[in-house]
Every structure is written in structure tokens, then in C-alpha cells.
Image (tube, coloured by chain):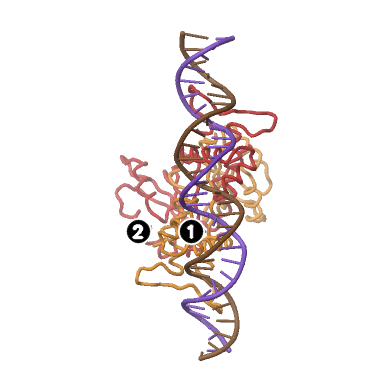
Chain colours: A orange, B red, C brown, D purple
Amino acid sequence: MPIYPDAPKRGRAPRDGGDDGSPEGIELNRKIIALLQQDGRMAYSAIAAQVGVSEGTVRNRVRQLLDDNVITIQAEALPAAMGYGFNGLTFVKVAAGTSIDDVAKRLSAIPEVYYLIMVLGRFDLSIATYHKSQDDYRDFLTTHFYGQSDIAGIENSLVLKVHKMKLQWDLNG
Amino acid sequence: MPIYPDAPKRGRAPRDGGDDGSPEGIELNRKIIALLQQDGRMAYSAIAAQVGVSEGTVRNRVRQLLDDNVITIQAEALPAAMGYGFNGLTFVKVAAGTSIDDVAKRLSAIPEVYYLIMVLGRFDLSIATYHKSQDDYRDFLTTHFYGQSDIAGIENSLVLKVHKMKLQWDLNG
DNA sequence: CTTTATTCGGCGGATTCCGCAGATATTGAG
DNA sequence: CTCAATATCTGCGGAATCCGCCGAATAAAG
């Protein structure tokens, strides 16, 4: 049950768009998700009470949302609290004739990499990493970038501060 | 009870470093967090059974970790599933005489912003955003950047693909 | 209207959560 | 070393929650 269904199917569809304010259909999912974004451990019954449906309904919806990978409910650990205080930023130009996806895949497998995107512009990949120290960052660079045949060049920077890092949406936008 | 305590205090301290393999002290926190990173709703009793302590202990540890902001347990929604398929990247040079933190704070409050960092280099801030369409991205730029007195200039790019995005650490590194 | 497929909600039992109090363990002081 | 102080850990009992199941309700297609 994706938030945005692909195609209409046979059978009962979720009730939707009650303009009387009653929580229904897709709107219901949005409200449930919004609550779980505040507290991932909130009791189903508490959610049910707030959105105005039964506990079983909330449980079913959440299960489907999880199964469909629309949402995930996980603990996030603050890197700094875990001893990872050095935050590197590396821009990569992939070597000609090499698959960007392959390089991205190789680098994604590195634990220190927490954010890796393919971008438009002078470089192909932009990578944010966490390390315990500056030395660890240097080791990271020498091990995975310098001298690697699939990489044409890199440029480095530092993340001085992470102001925001959330995959949470204003679902009523 | 941070993972890395600031200073020793009086009183009982968490048992630590049992090299017999029994889960104790800081190691215990790491194991609990690791499990919650897989399933944020895992029952305390289930966690307790796996790490070898009582349910109450797990509950207390998790509560403290949450209170100390070492971890958060929240639902994350997949942007694409929510209809946000356009992924913008904006680099900002803050105007002279303006506090970078203030600008960062202003922009962090925008729902579409999911990743905002202060960086070293030609620009001050790097911002990743999700939008429903290219038009929405343009609106986002014109509303919050162009013509704003606290911004000296911006440069734009696109995130073509997010290969990896996670705030989860190999706690045994 | 009838069929079909899916959601919704209530019900029971098992499980889990929660606050509390006592036991236990560790640190610092005398 | 001994003792006091402080914080953690665990067990317990009651309340709340979770879970599977089945029938009722609802919406789309024929």
C-alpha cells in the first residue's frame, strides 16, 4: 500500500479524501507516519486514538508501510557520541570508461561512508564520511581513492557542522 | 549515560570491559543500539534475551540513551514514495557580516531541506533538498535564496541518485 | 445487482511494558 | 581497609499493549 498507488486494482480501495476532517485513506497513512516520525516506538493504540481509527487498523497500515519500504523505523546513533568526530567530504571524478555505478557501489560498501550521491557538475560523486580522527580520514583517502584505477581525481573538503540530516517530510505539504 | 562519559562521578559505574564475552557496560549499549538499528520497535525483552541482561535494564539504558540524545528512534519516509522525486543541491555563500549559523538555522526550518551542512571551501553551506517537481525547486530557490539579504550567492546542482544515506555506525569498528 | 478483493474493527489470550523497591556493585573518603 | 554514598541491575505484580483471527463493511469491476 504505497502512499501513491501505482494503478487501481479490483476490490476494496482505502477510503479517501473525507473533507469532513475524518482521517481516511492515504491521509490516514500520512497522519500515522507523522506520529511515528516523532516517536518511532509510539504505541499503536496511542496512534489509533489520535487519528481516530482502531488499533488493529494502525497496526496493519504500519506493517504494510514497512513491508513496502515506504518507511523504516530504526534507531539512529549520533556519530559524535560514538566517537566519530571527524567529518570528511570527498568529491570524485570517475575515470573515463568506468561505470559510475560500479564506483559508487564499491565506495558505498565502506562503513565510514554515510552519504553518497551522484551529482551533476564538475564531479560525479559526492561523499560524506565520518571518522574518529584526521588520521583516519587520511587512511581512508589513501586506501580507497589515491592510486585507484577507477578514479580520475578527487577533491577534498570538510564538513564543519551538520545542521540537519533527516528524511522526514511535512506530509501535509 | 553517554557512550563516552565525560568524567568519572561518585557511585556505581556501569560494569565494563568483560573480556569473557559477557555483555557489560559500554559494550552493552553498543549491542542494544545495534539491535535497535535493525528494528526500532524491537521489544525490550527480546533485546534483553539477546544481550543477556534483564528487560528492565534494557529499558533503562534505552531511555537514557534517548534522553541524552545519543540515539533517536523515529520513522523515516522514503521521499520517492511520498511523491518527492526531484532532488536539488544548493551551495550557499553567506553574505559578509552575517552569521552562518543564523542562515543555517533559517534554512534548516524549511521542510524540503533534509541535509544541511557547513563546509570548508568556496561556499559556506551545502544543502540537499527534495521536491515534487522541478517547478517546486525553482519556487524553493526564488523564495528562500534569490533576493535574500543574508545570502551573497548560490550555485546549484542536482542529485542524480542517492546511493547511500544512513546514520548508522559499525559500532564494533 | 452481483461478484470480488481488500480494508476495517472487535475479541480473546499471550506478551510486553511500566513503576517500584530491594539487592548489588563501584567509587571516593576517612 | 572500612564505610558511606551513589548509581545500576533485577525481580515482581498490575496495567497496558500487541498479535492473530474472523466476520462485517466498503469500493471497484463485470
Q: Which residue is mark 1?
A: B87
Circles 2 and 1: CB atoms closer than 8 Å: no
Q: Secondary structure at mark 1?
A: strand
Question: Relative to B116, is C3 above or below?
Answer: below
Q: Give whichever of B112, B97 is nearer the camera.
A: B112
| Tag 2 subunit | B
Q: Which residue is mark 2?
A: B142
Q: Can residue B47 be seen at all in this image of the molecule?
A: yes
Count of picture labels: 2
Residue drawn at (42%, 45%) of the image: B125
Question: Relative to A156, is A48 above or below?
Answer: below
- How far from the left and from the top, in percent, is residue B164? 58, 51
Comes first in the chain, label 2 or label 1 = 1
- How far from the left and from the top, in percent, is residue B165? 55, 50
Q: Secondary structure at mark 2?
A: helix
Q: Is residue B138 left or right of residue B148?
A: right
Of the residues shown, which amino acid type is indicated by label 1?
Asn
Residue drawn at (68%, 44%) of the image: A148
- The 10 Å Cα crowd at callout 1, few under 14, some 14 to 19, many 20 or more, is many
- How far from the left and from the top, in percent, is residue C12? 56, 61
Q: Name the quadrant containing residue A156.
A: top right
Question: Relative to A108, is B143 above or below?
Answer: below
Residue drawn at (54%, 67%) of the image: A1
- How far from the left and from the top, in percent, is residue A13? 51, 75
Marks 2/1: CA–CA distance:
16 Å
Q: Give whichever of B172, B90 is nearer the camera.
A: B172
Which label sits on residue B24? none
